[in-house]
Amino acid sequence: MNNYELMVIFTPVLSEEEFKAAQKKYTDLVVENGGEVLHSNPWGLKSLAYPIDKKTTGLYWIMEYKAPSSFNEKLKIQLLRDESQMRHMYTALDKYAVDYNAKKRSGGKFTNEKTPA
């Protein structure tokens, strides 16, 4: 299984309950297809750099997950069918990105690996 990160921008007209339900929908989809949700981070309402569908704000949500590579096509289909999302992007994470995200979440310090000679 590979590590991925999904970022979704939902329409700003969603209520708090609808926003949480949309997040749960995708986390459940990952688990149902043999994956594992490593971290979920709702950023909330943020301004967009440019208008999307005549909206200047959006509800951001980021999920880090582990799943088989074949799952991403199923996820893409579900995201395209969902009218509450305006944009989405998923990226494959290499081992360095996974380590960085884990340290960032745990509050660990980032040090330079080089030692003086």
Image (cartoon, rainbow, N blue to C red):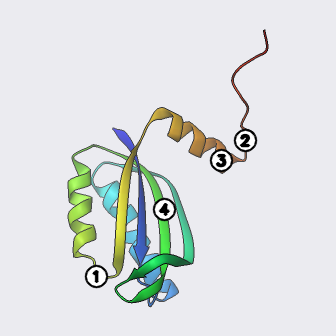
Disc 2 versus disc 3: distance between alpha carbons?
6 Å
Disc 4 versus disc 1: distance between alpha carbons?
18 Å
User: Are there few (<14), some (14-19), or many (20+) residues within 10 Å of tag 1?
Assistant: few
Tag 4 near tag 1, CB within 8 Å: no
User: Earlier along the polypeptide chain: callout 4 or callout 1?
Assistant: 4
Where residue 68 appears, as percent x and y from the top left, is 28, 43
User: Earlier along the polypeptide chain: callout 1 or callout 3?
Assistant: 1
Q: Nearer the viewer, residue 115 or 62?
A: 115
Residue topped by disc 4: 62
Residue topped by disc 2: 108
Q: Name the kind of residue labelled 3 in the image.
A: Lys
Q: Name the kind of residue labelled 2 in the image.
A: Gly
Residue topped by disc 3: 104
Residue 25, relative to residue 18: is it above or below? above
The answer to whether 43 appears left or right of 12 in the picture is right
Residue 87: quarter of image:
bottom left
Disc 1 versus disc 3: distance between alpha carbons?
32 Å
Q: Name the kind of residue labelled 4 in the image.
A: Ile
Disc 3 versus disc 4: distance between alpha carbons?
14 Å
Disc 4 versus disc 2: distance between alpha carbons?
20 Å
User: Earlier along the polypeptide chain: callout 3 or callout 4?
Assistant: 4
Q: Name the kind of residue labelled 1 in the image.
A: Glu
Residue topped by disc 1: 83
